[in-house]
Amino acid sequence: MSEAAFRPSPGWRFAGHAVLVALCLSVVVPMAIVLGTSFKVPNEVYRLQPWPDAPTMENYARLFGERAFGTYVWNSVATTALRVVGELVIALLAAYAFARWSFRGRDALFVLVLAAMMVPPQLTMIPLYLLMAELDWFDTWTALIVPHLAMPYAAFLLRQHFLSIPRELYEAARMDGAGSWTTLWHVAVPNIGPAIAAIAIVLAMDSWNEYFWPMLMSTEPSSRTVQIGLREFVEEEFGNYGGLMAGAVLASLPMLLLFFLFQRRIVDTFVSSGVKG
Amino acid sequence: MRSSWGQGRDPEPYLYLAPMLALLAVFTYWPLVHTAYLSVVRWNMAPGAAMPFVGLTNFASVTSGSLFAAASYNTVIYLAASIPLKVLLPIPIAVFVWSLGGRGAAYRTILFLPTLISFVVVSVVVLWLLNPMGGHVPALLAMAGVAMGNPLADAERAIWLVIGLSSWKVLGFHVLIYVAGLSAIPRDLVEAMRIDGAGDWRILRSLIWPLLGPTTLFVLISTILFTLQQCFTPIDILTQGGPSNGTTNLFYMVYQLAMRSFDIGGGAAGTVMLFALLLLLVAAKFALLDSRVAYER
């Protein structure tokens, strides 16, 4: 996107910039305050000046020392990694089935899979909670990973990508005697690498930032994810705002880093959902 | 695009599909059925206890409570307020950002940042920024002579804080969706209108607004379907539905009934009602979408 077709008159342009700058400030200024406060000693926290005069790492040290944020981060990292891999594999298999075969009930099953996207977690909460109790999955990684492994949206996107691979590639593989499994992993998947990467990142963000289910599943500190740890910190160290802001930074940094590394892909994936629909 | 393997008897596709279907059956569809069952029995949660069928008693007790009344009322507010804030407001912003072309990249990046951070972080930061005892916002307002008080403790105002936060968080995302929709508008059309002497307003009204229709509809429907659940996190962290049920909505109410009051039957009944409402909205979505698309053709 270089030069767009529509160019409003100077008056409107000024107003537009003014509004946009205000909006951007509403994003950037709080972030600056959070970052600055995380480095402040308790005395300085209540001062209006966003940056500390005497910066300290004390707040961060405390998170890992007195509070178990190391464990929380580890829980988040591990469950996110395992979950994303699982989600991708299962979505790839399903997308492949929908894209490469026409079989009885295909359309109905497709609708069934997509319809599941519309079911909010609060609607399935009660029986799932009871199920987790019965399986004794509270405070386990399993509880955070397995119920989420089916990601209809990922399957939907991957199916689109599989459909856009030229048939010749599939045909060539068949000529060579490749079965469906080989074709999937050696022809189809390598061809949509970037798309898979982008979807993986979006799935990772969903997992890292999740609140509802991890909150329900965690009954003791050692099983908390970083988001739940942050939430509990509010009560555990009530009034320790320096520490709270440090926790906020910790909980956001990985995703922000991921974004700046893979910016283009992420935005395209998020947004393509809006245009295609 | 037709696939090369088209024999209907082949078991292979079913095998590939099996894991996804099995997971959805266990973790999405079976719970819906089980919830419906739980909504019509009485259960005190003791293992092995009898679960007598009680018909619509649970539904009656839920709908007659003050929590339900407050949650329903608030749900309407959440939805009604979300439309101008989350669906309409991003449009002029997107038009402007789109008109900047590549030079709008910085704006787009910054606006997108709230999408990346969790609502937990946003809520927790708000606890600090709006803190009456030293948060930046009340302090700055006090310097300007405005006494802000504590919106979180105010039964009337708290809901607007939640609505404001969730609108802020989703703004950049929606702006980008609209920008993508705008980018699909062919330049020649705009240029042709310019050559004919059309002013900004005319181009916006006769060309851009109608072509943005499908995107707007998409954002509208997504917003209506997801706004309530999106607000769960800030409600749980900031107000737990209060004060005095001032911020609860039908989604949060189900959680309150089941997990706070341990009223499983009530929670299940609430869930069933909510599901019915959702089905209605989805049906409306398909009806609207189809008629709209037909019109476009």
Image (cartoon, rainbow, N blue to C red):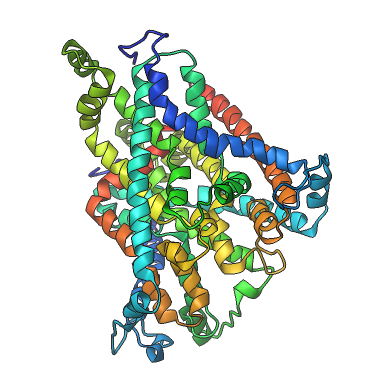
**Residue in the foreground of this view, choosing between A31 and A205:** A205
Q: Is residue B174 above or below residue B21?
A: below
Indicate the position of residue A90 as horizontal and vertical percent values. Answer: 37, 34
Residue A6 shows in the view? no
Task: Residue B297 in the image: state x and y as whole percent.
Answer: 48, 20
Residue at the (80%, 50%) spot, across then down: B63
**Quarter where residue A257 is shown:** bottom left
> Residue extending furthest front?
B48
Res B15 quadrant in image: top left
Near-viewer residue (B180 or B161):
B161
**Which of A222 and A165 lies nearest the eye of the viewer?**
A222
Residue lying farthest to the bottom in this orientation: A43
Residue A213 seen in render: yes
Above or below, B123 relative to B105:
below
Relative to B215, does residue B9 appear above or below in the rendering?
Answer: above
Quadrant containing the C terminus of chain A in the rendered view: top left
Q: Is residue A4 left or right of residue A130?
A: left
Above or below B77: residue A183: above
Q: Residue B20: x, y in percent?
A: 44, 32
**Mark count:** 0
Residue A150, given in percent of the width and then of the height, sits at: 44, 37
Q: Residue furthest left?
A: A176
Quarter of the image where the N terminus of chain A is located: top left
